[in-house]
Image (spheres, rainbow, N blue to C red):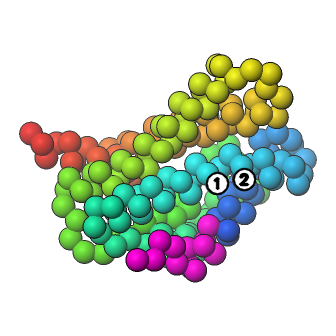
Amino acid sequence: MVLFTISEIIGVIVLTLYLGYLFSGMTTKKKFDKEDFKFSMMVAAPAVILHEFSHKFTALILGFPSVFHVFYEEGFTLILAGVSVLLKIVGSPFIFLIPGFVSIPGNVGVMDSGIIAFAGPLINLILWIGAGIYLKHGKRMTKRKMMLAYATKRVNMILFIFNMLPFAPLDGEKVFNALFSLF
């Protein structure tokens, strides 16, 4: 069994750079700052990539083949990526993006679909809580580490809450469908 395809590895690299650009400006208002770009990648890329690969590995554990697709592999998500870049360029405070998704071919039942869907937001919840605990109990943090933990907490909180909304195509819809199927 192949855990990662070459396409997925290349996609992670491209996605990391894309997210670094979209989230840049977190620590500085300069047009481009290399340190801010790296900081943005350190916050956003783990939140998104771990989210997506949690879906993939949960599907694999449940016996379903799965593949991670980065935004440029599908027309709709590529268009959204372009719109997100334009919104970033014009300074919009809101950027809507679908950086990638995991496809699972075959017939996945409601409960398995709910479990797979919840795996992504669960990682964001863990990162959110973990960063919060680190901020509360971390001793002698540098300013940079404190900023990194705060940004990690904030980004993962937003991703968790947003992805758990019970509307298609968000993960929350599949999670709530699975919960409702129990009754």
| Disc on res. 45 | 1
**Residue 5 sits inside the magenta stretch:** yes
User: How packed is label 2: few (under 14 Cα within 10 Å), some, or many (20 or more)?
Assistant: many
Residue hosting label 2:
41
- The percent position of residue 22, horizontal first and vertical second, equals 70, 55
Label 2 sits on a secondary structure element that is helix
Q: Which residues are magenta?
A: 1-12
The residue positioned 80% from the left and 52% from the top of the image is: 38
Extreme residue toward the left, this view: 183
Cβ atoms under marks 1 and 2 closer than 8 Å: yes
Q: In the displayed structure, does residue 26 sit left or right of residue 80?
A: right
* Camera-side residue of 82 and 68: 68
120 vs 104: above or below:
above
**Residue 32 sits inside the magenta stretch:** no
- Under mark 2, the amino acid is Met
- The percent position of residue 78, horizontal first and vertical second, equals 57, 72
Q: In the displayed structure, does residue 41 sit left or right of residue 168?
A: right
The residue positioned 55% from the left and 38% from the top of the image is: 127
- In the rendered image, the quadrant that contains the N terminus is bottom left
